[in-house]
Image: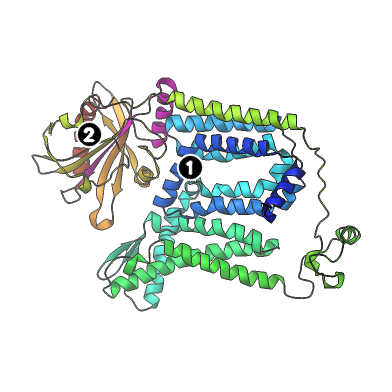
Amino acid sequence: MSASPNEIALRRWMRERGWSTTTVAELVLLAGLFVALYARTITGLAGKWWNHDQLHGFLVPLISLYLVWMVRERLRHVPTSPVAALGLPIILVAGSLVVLGEIGGVATLSEISLLGMIVGLVLLLGGTAYLRVLGFPITYLAFMLPILEDLVAPLHWPLQLITAQQGVTILQMLGFPALVEQQYVVLPHITLEVAGVCSGVNYLISIAAIGLPLAYLALRKLWSRVALILLAVAIGWMANWLRVVLIGVWTSWGGEGLHGPFHILQGMFVAWVGYVGLFVAAWGLAKSESWGPDRGRAINPAGMAKALSSQSFPVGGRSLHELTLNDLPTDPPVSVHAEPSSPRAWHRAWWLAMLSLAGFLVIVFLTDRGPVNLKRDFAQFPRSIGDWVGTEADLQTAVFRIEGADQELLRNYRNHRGRRVQLYVAYLTSQRQGKEIINYVTARLHEQANDVTIPVDSGRVVKANRGRLGDRANERRTLFWYDVSSQIHASRYRAKLATLWDGLRRGRTNGAFVLLAGNPFDGDTVVLEREEEAFARVLIPILQQHIP
């Protein structure tokens, strides 16, 4: 059976690289070890993309691979020259980060490690010339990491205020009675809140993630590429204002469903409008680049002379007089001074990579010593705590829940003065990526929370967080903290470090999240907060009889 043209081209490319079938098998084996080491990280990322309105994350790896495919011709002329002195240290640092991330359930460390490991492997196996060619596709992978959301988190609040203000301004211009109170849009029959997730920041990241490669592939000039990104951000930002206005109009006309029929005015509306704007703007900017007789790419005389002297004609099926400016080199040819490595050097680098990945995989496996169960089951938790009496509650009525908790406790407590508080406890026998007491969900509780000090017993003092949860119509006071190895932490960062230390020292990563939610209609807020803190003072020692 004759080989297909693609197979012939692949074999020719492998011969030019000095690769054999064995080399391909070795790369496949290395890729398998890489996937095994980062399986939890990749799964955790996919979960965040799906559950946190970051669907562009699924596209980023595919776009990155396409960008690699676009530079395949350049890679053909880059000799492999392993640089163990640079690649191996980066691999060791990246491997240490993924071990720490897996042991302590710190997803951010593992996610950063993922990119670092790719850089290290490229340097170790291919060398610096390879990394220069693949620099943009690898750097672009940063858009799939949720760490970008943490970097732009300070923009949420100001953009909430601006979006609410602009939405009300447009509604008033259209003749609808509307007022703005900070992030709230007050209409005659309903009050809308521009929440943190509605600020539009996350969707601007999505638009930028698509806009950057589009600018790189579709446009040639720096000014047009920068203009495309700025236009996309502006369009996405204004689309968020439009979304608020349309929701206001929909609700003013008596429409049911806060975000309109089929919830088409959800946050992804911003991203889709931004995507449309991106492609329209890219088309227009590409047209503007071609205006005028000399608006094409500048021709380098040395490159032209070399092309005319070395090329055989016709080129691409066209004769010399049919060639256009775009067919000629735009820059001097890049000369690569690195010499191709010997097969022995490449195989030595491959063994170093294999042993490193396998070693870190073994360390991750050995440091996981299994789950840590409760000292006492929550079924034995007392119903009476001080002068508070509790009743069982359906977990579906919880004000807040931790996804993937191994044990949960939900009770509604009431004292003799009629004060009410909901107690929620989530316990994880072990924490891993995607199964944590501290993640992007609990991070929202900290947005407008302050530390409070609670004296417990024998002069011991702990710190907890006092915050708010829910919209203005049904806002609940919250008092919450983290319990790691019988130590109470208000700071999520201290709780993460404590989990990491326990994982390194004892191989255990269990932890608990505790939340008290007060009823907003029970009386004076200051008095209620004091009573809830007094309840927590008695509650903490009892909880620690159950939580290891």
* Residue 396 falls left or right of residue 358: left
Q: Amino acid at mark 1?
A: Ile
Is residue 392 located in the magenta-colored stretch of the structure?
no
Which residue is identified by label 2? Answer: 536
Is residue 509 located in the magenta-colored stretch of the structure?
yes
What x and y, as percent, mark residue 394?
18, 45
Q: Which residues are magenta?
A: 491-518
Q: Secondary structure at mark 1?
A: helix
**Residue at 49% across / 25% down in the picture?**
363
Q: Nearer the viewer, residue 535 or 324?
A: 324
Q: Is residue 328 visible?
A: yes
**Residue at 67% across / 47% down in the picture?**
134
**Residue at 42% across / 54% down in the picture?**
53
Q: Secondary structure at mark 2?
A: helix
* Residue 192 falls left or right of residue 47: left
Which residue is identified by label 1? Answer: 42
Q: For mark 2, does the 10 Å Cα neighbourhood hold few (<14), some (14 to 19), or many (20 or more) residues?
A: many
Seen in the picture, residue 43 relative to 184 is either above or below; the reply is above
